[in-house]
Image (tube, helix red, strand yellow):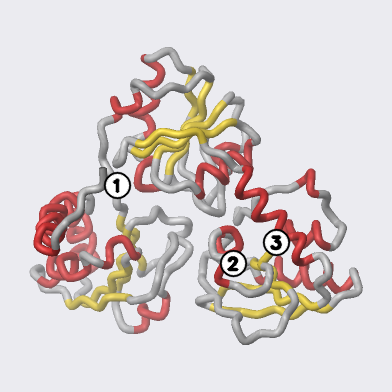
Amino acid sequence: MTKMLKTGEAALEVVNMQPQILARIDFEGILKELQTRGVKIIGIQLPDGLKYWSSEIAAKFEAEGFEVILSASPTYGACDIDVSLLQDVEVLLHFAHEPIFELDRVIYVPYRIDFDERSVENLNIPERKIALIATAQYAWKLEAVKSVLEAGGYEVEIGGGSDRIKLPGQVLGCNYTVLRDTTAEAVLFIGDGLFHPIGAAMYTGRKVYRFSPLSNEFEEVEASEFLKERMFAVARAMDAENFGIIVSSKIGQKRLGLARKLKEKVKKAGKKADIIVADVVSVANFNYDCFVNTACPRIAYDDWRNFQKPVLTPLELEIVLGLRSWGDYAMDEIL
């Protein structure tokens, strides 16, 4: 049964969450690093889930004598750094993501969710050989989870990934390389949401399970609906003659070289294509039959309903152009 909260109760619940939320941030370690650098003006970039706590977070640094400027820009990952703010601050603190590259004046601040690894003891996974994956907030705890599962008779692997991956077993929405050499019979994703485990299912072709330590939810992930949506997008684009190829200006997403190659493929197919560069992708006023996304893959996978025209991944464009069969469908990755 869903509990209905009165306004006062909801406010009390939020207040009671504050120590838990802020305890996941290593303020002491950040302050030591800032003091070592001798800086006084800092920028703070928070993902949407932490923006609610911006005042409390800023107050922690202001109490230590720092001037704080907050970024309002959305951030969807370590690839999405508000470099414009670096014009006005000495150091930018980018919260909740592990680095995918190093910038001199950017400090990545991990946001690590702790949980009791013993919560996986009673998961009903028939397969006995498992690959463990998680998002950055949970991946730091995978070795402890592995020990619990191995004590229960499972054979468990935690893979390493490409240069964009900093933690063993860590997956990004655009990168599943920790699973590239897996010999596991099934994959167990530790974390929240369905996008990453669906991506893992598409990447490996294996059965994937999701366990959320916060909600205690456990389920087998089904990718069929995702595939239906992608088939629908490809089918809508089959008659397209004029393509808009989207390129992100974000430092960790920019694939201009790929966009140029795709434009050449479109031209060789006797069709027209233009390259469109954007920070926040908005193409409402552009008159193209179809858009091809080389920015964050989730724009095509998650946000396609926000577009009136079909939005394809680079690999899906190849299907439309007859350069790839549907049987060779693969997830778009930034490697």
Badge 3, how many Cα within 10 Å: few under 14, some, many 20+? many
As helix, strand or loop, the secondary structure at mark 3 comes to helix
Amino acid bearing label 3: Ala
Q: Which residue is drawn at 26% across and 43% down?
A: 1
Of badges 3 and 1, nearer the viewer stands 3
Residue type, label 1: Arg
Label 3, on which residue?
233
Say whether residue 201 is left or right of residue 53.
Answer: right
User: Residue beneath label 2, please?
Assistant: 295
How many angstroms separate mark 3 from mark 1 (CA)?
36 Å
Q: Residue 266 falls in which quadrant of the image? A: bottom right
Measured Cα–Cα span from mark 2 to mark 3 = 17 Å
Horizontally, residue 253 falls left or right of residue 68, namely right
- Asked if the residues shown at circle 1 and circle 2 are in contact, with their CB atoms under 8 angstroms apart, the answer is no
Whole-percent x, y for residue 225 in the image = 61, 47
Residue 70 figure quarter: bottom left
Looking at the picture, does residue 180 appear above or below residue 237? above
The residue located at (35%, 47%) in the rendering is: 137
Are discs 3 and 1 less than 8 Å apart at CB? no
Q: How far apart are marks 1 and 2 (CA)?
A: 27 Å
Residue type at mark 2 is Ala
